[in-house]
Amino acid sequence: MRALDVAIIVLFLVGMPLLGVLLGGRQKSATDYFVSERRIPWWVVCVSVVSAETSTLTVLSVPVVSYLAPPEAGGMTYLTLAFGYIVGRIVVSFVLLPKYVAGELVTAYAFLGQRFGDGMRATASVTFQFTRLLADGIRLFATAIPIKVVLAAYGVDASYWAIVIVLGIAMVCYTFVGGVRAVVWVDAIQMLWYVVGGIVVVVALAGALPDGWFGDAMSANKFQVFDFSSNVLTGSFPFVAAFFGGALLAMASHGVDQLIVQRLMSTRDVRAARKALITSGFVVTLQFAFFLVIGVMMWAFYAAAVPTDPVSAGGLGLGNNDELFANFIVTELPSGLSGFVIAGILAAALSSSLGALASATVTDVYERVSRRTLTELERLRLGRVWTVVWAGLLIVCAGLFATGNRTAADPIVVQALGITGYTYGALLGAFLLGLMIRRANQTDAIVAFAATVAVMTFVILGVKFVGPSAEVRIDFSPAAPAEGVRTLVAWWYTPLGVAVTLLVGGLLSLRHRDRPTPGPVKQVDAETA
């Protein structure tokens, strides 16, 4: 790495937090701090939603999906998942968003408080907080990896702990001062940065590809979108699992995860929130298609440059598949452009979840436990305190992952990235239980929630499939599956979790003759949420 590249990356890491502070301004109330007085333009929220769900691992790994996909599966089958995302967002827009925005709630879990009671509200909120801490801890650690590589190339040996502390401080600065407004605007700018960086890569690749590369890619089945032949339980992107699993996954991630819901609540009204959410589905699909095309172009580039498989055959000396995109950026792009693109990759990971964690802690847990309604100033003060607390916990979590796992390809990191599989089905199932089964009460919901988490833990850790017949085997060994042994494809986790929650909660609700009183029945406004 040359000095110009390092200077661009440092400028980005320093400039983004400062820009967030300037754009966010100074908040005077908790409503402004948590949902920006509901006055952020819908198109900004749309871009922020896409940025929030895009991580460094997404930008680095999606091109590798199309690069390495076997011919029988096709290089673009990942898009089936994105098509399911669109359907899931449309359902959320018409089913759940009106409950949040029209009711002027501060968190998604306030709806569960209205329907079931404070016990279910706190259960769901704490689950979100724990899940988000783990997921974003890994995300922060993954962001530290390319920074460490860049610094090492320039002769600076920085520890992962030092890097995650600097990144954590950068995120907490603009979130603490500017609230959700700063987060949303910084998200929008960062998305623009990494998309422009991707365009730079496409232009560089286009000028280096051999003649006829597109026809070769078509012959190799690199542009196949739908896969109807793979095993529906264990295949990478079989149509049924990817499409329907993607739809329910989007309903969970964009309907009951406060990280996304907080951004949607900062719009003016239900119509604006709906436009932001549905449009984000089409934007993220185009984004996936864009990075998949980059993967196909890299396949054509390295097929000419390295006759054998550059990853498995060691042609490029890579440690793992996810290094492929970063390797091209560092070795093939000229000075300046390389630093710009790497800064764009970092931008995909610096979307802050601290405000969402703080709002959930203050409104869903603290006020319920203390049994008193806080004033706006008290809620604002506590929101800022918990923003700092969660930043500290996030840094510690990322540092612990860094201490135990020195590479992003470690199986423990891969397992932790799928942590939402344990809880997303239970969270979405609890919301659907409240909407669909009138007899269900708080006890039914909490028992169903706990049962779902237990079942999903058993399925994710213990259920494996052997051979082409997909014979089921129970095995809790932490080692990687042996040859011919596969786990359930992750896209089934959320649908299975939802089914368990509805089944258990529905059966328990049969004990009641009439519909019980569903907790507080009045609308909860921003002051009492």
Image (spheres, helix red, strand yellow):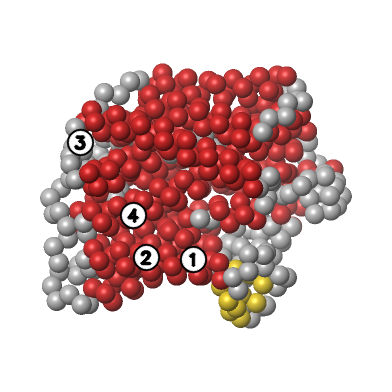
Query: Residue 192 location, x and y as percent?
Result: 52, 31
Q: Using residue 329 as the reference point, say whether residue 358 is left or right of it.
A: left
N-term mark: 4 or 2: 4
Element class at badge 4: helix
Q: Are marks 4 and 2 in contact (CB under 8 Å)?
A: no
Amino acid carrying mark 3 in the image: Leu
Q: Residues within 10 Å of mark 1 (few under 14, many from 20)?
A: some
N-term mark: 3 or 4: 4
> Residue sitting at 38 percent across and 62 percent down?
426
Q: Is residue 407 above or below residue 192?
A: below
Q: In front: 244, or 228?
A: 244
Q: Residues within 10 Å of mark 4 (few under 14, many from 20)?
A: many
Q: Using residue 307 as the reference point, say whether residue 132 is left or right of it.
A: left
Q: Nearer the viewer, mark 3 or mark 4?
A: 3
- Label 2, label 1: how far apart the Cα atoms are: 11 Å
Give the label on residue 457, or none.
1
N-term mark: 3 or 2: 3
Query: Residue 179 location, x and y as percent?
Result: 36, 29
Disc tally is 4
Quarter-wise, where is residue 7 in the image?
top right
According to the picture, the residue beneath numbered tag 2 turns out to be 450
Q: Using residue 116 as the reference point, say whether residue 499 is left or right of it.
A: right
Element class at badge 1: helix
According to the picture, the residue beneath numbered tag 3 turns out to be 374
According to the picture, the residue beneath numbered tag 4 turns out to be 124
N-term mark: 2 or 1: 2
- Label 3, label 4: how far apart the Cα atoms are: 21 Å
> Residue sitting at 53 percent across and 20 percent down?
15
Query: Residue 529 location, x and y as percent?
Result: 21, 43
Amino acid carrying mark 4 in the image: Ala
